[in-house]
Image (cartoon, rainbow, N blue to C red):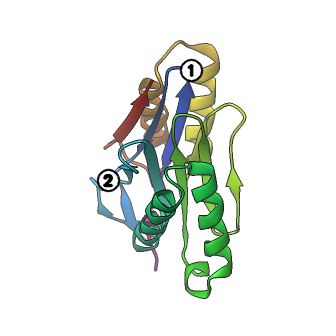
Amino acid sequence: MKMRSTTIVAARRPDGVAIGGDGQVTLGDTVMKQQAVKVRRMYEGRVLAGFAGSAADALALFEKLESRLEEFRGSLPRAAVELAKDWRSDRALRRLEAQIVACDAETSLLVSGGGDVLSPDDGVVSIGSGSSIALGVARTLTKHTEMSPEEIVREALLTTADVCIYTNGHITVETLSW
């Protein structure tokens, strides 16, 4: 049985970006924790990141991403590409089961162990068990409302929690504004 952390969603507007995650961690089909924090600030508070998947694996990847951000002086695209290369080629990292969403003032990225570094066209990205629901809600709210990124992320996660059994309503959101 694998321990899993679930839904992360990020939304972007011209004046800011937000990333949020629910608090549920499951082991198989059992809720083990309800108030986990899956999002955090990195690189002097200028990068936001969140994870879905195995918690221990994701935390190891967070450390790698932070070290790459330091190495490349906060360049998120460069750090993410190098992390993806490491993740795909390193024997130990290759077994890690998680995904990361990372955002800064210019970019929102999804990074996976398959070597993927994806930047969405609309600034909305989601990972985890409830990602398709959260992505649909966030995209709709981005297109059809004037809600802030934080409001979009919260509503997307609350709606997902109403539908997805692996997502709960204990939400943590981090924002960057400019």
Residue 114 sits in which quadrant? Answer: bottom right
**Magenta residues, as a range?**
1-5
Q: Is residue 136 above or below residue 45?
A: above
Q: Residue 129: tell me if it is visible.
A: no
Please say whether residue 3 is one of the residues in the magenta stretch: yes
Q: Which amino acid type is marked by label 1?
A: Pro
Q: Can you say which quadrant of the picture contains the C terminus?
A: top left
Give residue 37's mark.
Answer: 2
Q: Position of residue 23 (x, y in %)?
A: 34, 51
State the CA–CA distance, disc 2 to disc 1: 26 Å
**Image-quadrant location for residue 56:** bottom left
- Look at 67% across and 70% down and name the residue there: 85
Read off the residue under disc 1.
14
Q: Quadrant of residue 175?
A: top left
* Secondary element type, mark 2: loop
| First in residue order: circle 2 vs circle 1 | 1
Q: Residues within 10 Å of mark 1 (few under 14, many from 20)?
A: few
**Residue 167 on image: x %, y %:** 43, 50
Q: Dot 1 lies on which element?
A: loop
